Amino acid sequence: MIVIGCDHAACKLKETIKSYLEEKEIPFIDCGTDEGVPCDYPNMAETVCGKITNGEAEKGILLCGTGIGMSMAANKIKGIRAACASDCFSVKYTRLHNDANVLCMGERVVGHGLALELVELFLNTEFEGGRHQRRVDLITALESK
Ligand code: RB5
């Protein structure tokens, strides 16, 4: 299960990604927001990430104007490894090496075609584990320092 959410700056991109997920028959939860309903991105990050930390979803997609505010907020939540990215290399390696569980993108940064490529990579690239697991565990350890 995928969970997706955006603020008012990224509703159109959310709709594009939802269409892609529907076409691929990938189940998802849409946490909003919708056109004409402004929301503060930290609140949306909390809602979306909550669905991951409570086990309802495995991965999340957070969208705002830049993707940056969403990633800052999401990374405050225990158990969340959010990557703000706008290129294929970063998305591939944040899955391979960081086991990122949230992808953040900016509607004002990426075109819709590129965003769909990034989503595809994010969903289909497996974490490598091995030496990278230790480093991910060290990130987790920072949560309780
Ligand atoms: C909203 O205008 C904008 O600040 C927000 O979408 C995001 O870009 C913040 O990081």
Image (cartoon, rainbow, N blue to C red):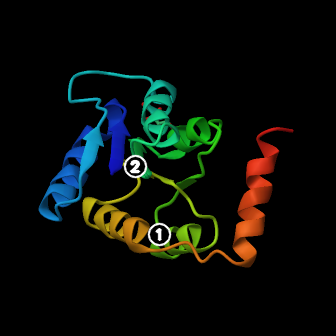
Q: Residue at x 34, y 35 (%)?
A: 9
Question: In this rendering, would 56 be left or right of 26?
Answer: right
Up the image or down, 131 lies above or below 138; here it is: below
Judging depth in this view, the residue of 83 and 23 nearest the camera is: 23
Residue for badge 1: 87
Q: Position of residue 35 (x, y in %)?
A: 20, 29
Q: Residue placed at 30% from the left, 60% from the top?
A: 111
- 41 or 58, which lies in front? 58
In the image, residue 123 sits, relative to residue 93, either above or below, namely above
Left or right of 52 in this view: 141: right
- Foreground residue, 138 or 94? 138
What percent of the width, then of the height, locates residue 53?
A: 52, 40
Identify the mark at residue 7; answer none if there is no mark: none
* Element type where label 2 sits in the image: strand
The secondary structure type at the circle numbered 1 is loop
The amino acid type, in three-letter code, at marker 2 is Ile
